[in-house]
């Protein structure tokens, strides 16, 4: 390589490593774009959203930023060993590896994500570092792990003896057939029943509005259990598993991520709210879009959760069994059964 090309390469490499360019370009200071005096509120997917909301609420009740609230909130299920679907103790893929997906987005449209990252218990915080310290949006696999370790995140074994045992149980019946939809068949055969349903749910998606009227969202998951190694779901894909537009609202999703990605689900929900639909109506239309395009999707679960610019919350799912938690000054442990098409 000639010297000039080498120097060009070195400059690019150090700019990326230091994130100096990124910091110069990304405006990370919160601006009160939403309107001060808003009553803060946070909502999140599934029953474990209650405890996560309460952690987020500590930030919001203190006048903190929605971005900090959602990060702190979703770290709770990430660390929870009873939760086999997020972070530490998440069920592994079919090769026995725990691979995690996460994304975060703030009120200015800044976003960061990691996909298929191993050995890091809090992928949401790595996603935030991607957003704040690199010029990129999404880091995957080994590169994401390398970045996390460079940033000081501890490298740990995420497969617990209990999750390993569950994987061995699954292996007794599973045939390694990497064909389309094989994961869905194994979910049906497994303890969870419906793919993505309440007993085999995987994801926490959280949306918050702070006292400045600013919205942020976070989404983190170990993805679908027994997935192919390297499979990435909707959760780290901005627009699919998470989307925030501070002028309109925010949305997140849970369930079988492939259907959400195909329909750019969370972006769709936000755009429907932009057209005047309520959060619930927007979520319902996004679910029905999935069903119209693929009627067979009635056998799986997908749920959307949305919050509008005023803090109104709504949700809709394909099937019964979806739940979401809402927390504000009035009540910190509300758990609502999600309405559904079937
Ligand atoms: C995924 N959407 O990886 C996630 C999993 C999930 O309920 O939410 N399951 O596809």
Image (cartoon, rainbow, N blue to C red):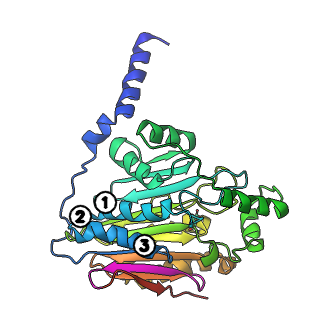
Q: Residue furthest left?
A: 36
Q: Position of residue 115 (x, y in %)?
A: 53, 51
Residue at figure coordinates x 51%, y 81% from the top left: 323
Q: Which mark is residue 68?
A: 1
> Dividing the picture into quarters, in which one does residue 342 lie?
bottom right
Residue at figure coordinates x 26%, y 69% from the top left: 60
Neighbor class of circle 3 (other Cα within 10 Å; few <14, some 14-19, many 20+) is: some
Q: Position of residue 40 (x, y in %)?
A: 26, 75
Residue at figure coordinates x 42%, y 23% from the top left: 9
Q: Which mark is residue 64?
A: 2
Disc 3 C-beta below 8 A from ligand 1: no
**In the foreground, 63 or 310:** 63
Q: Helix or strand or loop: what does disc 1 sit on?
A: helix
Q: Are marks 3 and 2 in contact (CB under 8 Å)?
A: no
Q: From the viewer's perspective, is the residue at label 3 or at label 2 nearer? A: 3
Say whether residue 329 is left or right of residue 336: left
**In the foreground, 179 or 320:** 320
Neighbor class of circle 2 (other Cα within 10 Å; few <14, some 14-19, many 20+) is: some
Say whether residue 92 is left or right of residue 289: right
Say whether residue 320 is left or right of residue 154: right
Q: Are marks 1 and 2 in contact (CB under 8 Å)?
A: yes
Mark 3 lies on residue: 51
Q: Quadrant of ligand 1?
A: bottom right
Q: Which mark is residue 305?
A: none
Q: Position of residue 201 (x, y in %)?
A: 59, 71
Query: Does 323 appear in magenta?
Result: yes
Query: Does 171 appear in magenta?
Result: no
Q: Position of residue 180 (x, y in %)?
A: 74, 61
Labels 3 and 2: the sequence-earlier one: 3
Q: Is residue 70 visible?
A: yes
């Amino acid at each position: 390589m000639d010297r000039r090309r080498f120097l060009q390469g070195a400059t690019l490499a150090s700019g990326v490593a230091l994130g100096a360019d990124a910091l110069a370009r990304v405006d990370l200071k919160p601006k009160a774009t939403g309107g001060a005096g808003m009553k803060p509120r946070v909502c999140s997917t599934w029953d474990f959203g209650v405890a996560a909301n309460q952690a987020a609420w500590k930030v919001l009740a203190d006048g903190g930023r929605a971005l900090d609230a959602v990060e702190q909130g979703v770290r709770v299920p990430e660390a929870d060993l009873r939760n086999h679907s997020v972070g530490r103790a998440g069920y592994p893929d079919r090769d026995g590896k725990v691979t995690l997906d996460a994304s975060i987005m703030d009120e200015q449209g800044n976003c960061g994500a990691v996909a298929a990252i191993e050995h890091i218990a809090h992928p949401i915080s790595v996603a935030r570092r991607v957003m704040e310290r690199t010029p990129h949006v999404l880091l995957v696999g080994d590169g994401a792990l390398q970045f996390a370790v460079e940033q000081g995140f501890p490298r740990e074994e995420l497969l617990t003896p209990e999750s390993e045992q569950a994987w061995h149980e699954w292996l007794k019946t599973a045939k390694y057939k990497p064909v389309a939809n094989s994961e869905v068949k194994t979910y049906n055969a497994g303890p969870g029943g419906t793919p993505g349903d309440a007993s085999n749910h995987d994801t926490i998606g959280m949306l918050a509005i702070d006292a400045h009227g600013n919205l942020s969202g976070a989404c983190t998951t170990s993805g679908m259990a027994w997935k192919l190694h390297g499979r990435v779901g909707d959760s780290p894909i901005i627009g699919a598993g998470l989307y925030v537009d501070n002028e309109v609202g925010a949305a997140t999703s849970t369930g079988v991520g492939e259907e959400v990605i195909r329909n750019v689900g969370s972006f769709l929900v936000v755009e429907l709210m932009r057209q005047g639909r309520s959060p619930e109506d927007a979520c319902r239309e996004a679910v029905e879009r999935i069903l119209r395009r693929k009627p067979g999707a009635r056998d799986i679960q997908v749920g959307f959760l949305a919050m509008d610019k005023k803090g109104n919350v709504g949700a809709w799912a394909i099937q019964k069994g979806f739940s979401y938690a809402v927390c504000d000054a009035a009540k910190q442990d509300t758990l609502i059964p999600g309405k559904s098409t079937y």
